[in-house]
Amino acid sequence: MGKPAPARGAAAIPLFDAVSTDAGAPPSRPRSGAAPRAGHPAPADPGRAALALEAHARLCAAYHCPIAYFHALPPLDELVSSLLSHRTRNADSARAFRSLRERFPSWEAARDAPVAEVERALAGVTWPEAKAPALQRTLRAITEVRGGRLDLDHLAGMEPEAARAWLAALPGVGPKTAAAVLSFSALRGRALPVDSHHHRVAQRIGLIPRSLAVGPSHAVLEALLPADWTAQQVYDHHEVFMLHGQRCCIFRAPACGRCVLLDLCPEGQARRNGAARDAAPPAPPPEPGL
């Protein structure tokens, strides 16, 4: 139901978005009826903005934009789905989401159920023992700031940056989850999620530095896109970068030889040149006196 696709590990890893809090401190929460003011990244470097557009055009040609949205869940359902998908394969998080919906008649019921029941419903995801209480905390926080209501319907009337800030102020919600709710849900908002595949491609072609983590890369990468792009175009941008990271620019052995971005990619060219050097026979020794 969400987008990520990770592996099992220790439950001590922060849930849900690792970048949603500062040094373990709880995030500030939006007051009922008002959203925090959204920050704006510094103006984009023109060279990198041009590179982003060229990469977008090539990848859209390769993966056939516009790309259909994969579902149209209500925003609260999308939030739950995205939270469950953290470091979990899509099929497993989708199964857990269906299990929650079958076990509990409403999100209010899931919020108020014994945590052990929620954990049993999440048995197929990574760290259900941590995700169950974390999910309930998020649902309770929404209920509190919404004056007793458990929904996200008010986001439809907000500007994307304000809606993103409102979501990111909830416990456990960071930039990726906030953007996913706005973009992937029935809201169809203009927001750029960045997953690990998207992030890897952006780093390798030089849109962002190697030192920039996934969380803070959201604002930087979205700032490279034209302000007049529609929500569909921004969604396509994420999807084609993600697909390219999954199918070609993979983590351990990228298929640089068939990459449509090779001439734009310093890392790909270095890999290809290194492979050519490794495969070439050693040069003969120079003639005496030359």
Image (cartoon, rainbow, N blue to C red):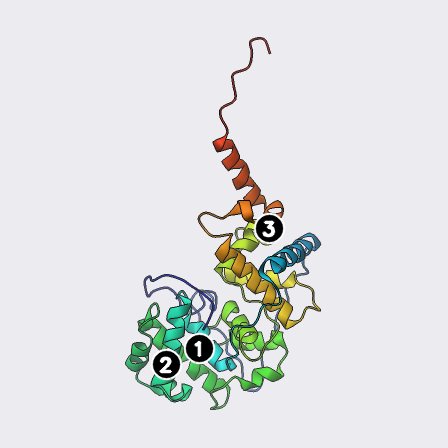
> What percent of the width, then of the height, locates residue 98?
38, 79
User: Where 70 sits versus 55, above or below?
Assistant: below
Marks 1 and 3 sit apart, C-alpha to C-alpha, by 35 Å
Select label 2 or label 1 by which is in front.
Answer: 2
Amino acid type of the residue that numbered disc 3 sits on in the rendered structure:
Val
Q: Residue at x 64, y 67 (%)?
A: 233
User: Of label 1 and label 3, which has the lower sequence position?
Assistant: 1
Circles 2 and 1, Cβ within 8 Å, touching? The answer is: yes
Amino acid type of the residue that numbered disc 1 sits on in the rendered structure:
Val
Q: Residue at x 47, y 80 (%)?
A: 77
User: Of label 2 and label 1, which has the lower sequence position?
Assistant: 1
Select label 1 or label 3 by which is in front.
Answer: 3
Marks 3 and 2 sit apart, C-alpha to C-alpha, by 41 Å
User: Where 111 sits versus 181, above or below?
Assistant: below
Q: Name the foreground residue: 215 vs 77.
A: 77
Amino acid type of the residue that numbered disc 2 sits on in the rendered structure:
Leu
Q: Residue at x 51, y 54 (%)?
A: 200
> What percent of the width, then of the height, locates residue 136?
38, 80
The residue singled out by tag 2 in the image is 100
Question: Alpha-carbon neighbours of circle 1 within 10 Å: few (<14), some, or many (≥20)?
Answer: many
Q: Name the foreground residue: 11 vs 277.
A: 277
Task: Decide if residue 135 is on the left or right side of residue 263.
Answer: left
Q: Secondary structure at mark 2?
A: helix
The residue singled out by tag 1 in the image is 80
What is the quadrant of the C terminus in the image? top right
User: Of label 3 and label 2, which has the lower sequence position?
Assistant: 2
> What percent of the width, then of the height, locates residue 79?
47, 77
Question: Alpha-carbon neighbours of circle 2 within 10 Å: few (<14), some, or many (≥20)?
Answer: many
Task: Decide if residue 265 is on the left or right side of residue 45.
Answer: left
Residue found at the far top of this picture: 289
The residue singled out by tag 3 in the image is 260
